[in-house]
Image: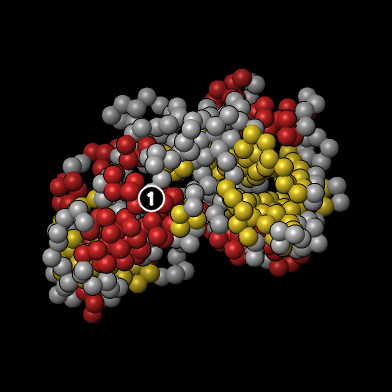
Amino acid sequence: MKEACGVVGIVAPGRDVAHLCYDALYALQHRGQESAGMATYHNQQITVVKDNGLVSHVFADTTLRALAGSIVIGHTRYSTSGSANWTAAQPVYRSAGRSGFAIAHNGNLTNTSALADAQDIRVTSMLSDSDLVAELLARSVERGASLAEALGEVLSGAEGAFSMVILEAEAVHAVRDPYGFRPLCLGRLGTEDEPEGWIVASESPALDVVGATFIREIRPGEMLTITTEGVESVQLLEPAGEKQKLCIFEFVYFARPDTYLMGHQVHTTRRRMGELLAGQSVVEADIVMGVPDSGIPAAEGFAKASGIPFGYGLVKNRYIGRTFIAPDQDKRAASVRRKLNPLRENIEGQRLVVVDDSIVRGTTTQALVRMLRDAGAKEVHLRISSPPFMWPCYFGIDTPTRDDLLAANHSISEMNAFIGSDSLEFITLENLRAAIRLDGECCDACLTGNYPAPVPVALGAAGGRW
Ligand code: AMP
């Protein structure tokens, strides 16, 4: 299971936009570590640089210097659909129209087959949903539409999740699906009186890092068109309902703790999750520790509310990304050891409350509990700051099928036995919602099975990925 992609778009005349985009992508590295890329427009030409690997591997200073111009989009990728090889790296370029265009996409379309069939496009395993959108846009532009018109035409037929940035000569468009599943925000470089440029990005820390001021989030179904003249907004697509459906897992795990989503700082919501989780039952323990990094804020909240001292029990190798490098089960245990090492003197003989954000397959958590016991823990009480993860995501997260989701096939006591903890408790859905303080404005299909938009499978007991 991996996390959602990151996108950036910048228009800033006179500024070194490639370096700014590099910094912004670096801030979004946690959203995808498979590939990184940028597209710039300069001298009537779009240039794309992309490759597999981390942002810092893909771009050297010399590469960035060669990317001239005042307009850029960028992407960090992990694969939800299409393959994980080089050809799937983004931005995706097409030569249609006056200057051609390039797109970078975070999300996942759920009706790709229907979209492709309607225009006789052969779907191959090499074709990602972003390639498909690019192809559909190109066809529309070749029929005489402007890129903005083409976006309206193509995206009004698209179902699923998309936060997209699109570059053409002199303009960046930024558009969000009618549910607002994946985040996307706007910031300004310079002052209100003298703006020096504009930036859109998946998460607000990408704005902070380039010195931009957060302005607002892009609304569900809205398209911003950014040029050197400023920012224009159109409601490209009808919002799907009165309430947005931002992915609840952005709060639980994906987003950076310093990110603001719909007015809430993610770290604060995670701390509240821990506080409310602690209030659900009493546990006797000596220390509360979080599993780095995403379990730490909730552990802090748990400690505060329970009165059990907060402490550190695990050290994380900070040079290891979030992606599980080793995909098979055996190697996963080894990858836990590569990533986390216990602080023996804090653990030995202690009754631990261990707070983590989620259990997906249960395999890394099992390896973790074994590691803590080997380090001398007397008791391990596992507390999870999201309810049981039972349903696959079709809106931008690469999740296992229902068969592989531990909670889909086991009771909590079976999960406790499998993982080897002394006790296991999950935050309730009510408490998670209370911690986030967004009433009905989140998609929680992974926890409830209530998909706000059509999904491309019959959701029988088997469920699964298509
Ligand atoms: P497991 O025990 O195998 O279910 O793994 C649970 C761990 O995976 C928790 O520590 C989570 O923080 C982490 N996790 C949750 N979602 C993801 C994801 N999308 N990518 C990588 N790790 C994740």
Task: Measuring from the top left, give residue 464's x and y in whole percent.
Answer: 37, 33
The reply to whether residue 360 is visible in this rendering is: no
Confirm whether residue 157 shows in the render. Answer: yes
Residue 178 falls in image quadrant: top right
Q: Mark 1 points at which residue?
A: 436
Residue found 34% across the figure and 52% down from its top: 435
Q: In this view, does 407 lie to the left or right of 72?
A: left
Q: Where is residue 345 in the image (x, y as percent from the top left)?
A: 23, 80
Q: Looking at the image, which residue sits at the far right? A: 43
Point 32% across, 55% down: residue? 273
Q: Against 465, is 300 above or below?
A: below
**Residue situated in front as seen by the camera: 27 or 414:** 27
Camera-side residue: 220 or 317? 220
Q: In which quarter of the image is residue 124?
A: top right
Q: Is residue 380 left or right of residue 137?
A: left
Question: Which residue type does callout 1 highlight?
Answer: Ile
Judged from the image, the secondary structure of the residue bearing numbered disc 1 is helix
Task: Name the residue located 67 percent from the left edge and 54 percent from the top edge.
Answer: 199
Protein image colouring: secondary structure
Compared with residue 226, is residue 365 higher up or lower down, i.e. above or below? below
Q: Quadrant of the C terminus?
A: top left
Classed neighbour count for the residue bearing mark 1: other residues with Cα under 10 Å, few (<14), some (14–19), many (≥20): many
Place of residue 121 in the rendered image (x, y in percent of width and height, measured from the top left): 63, 25
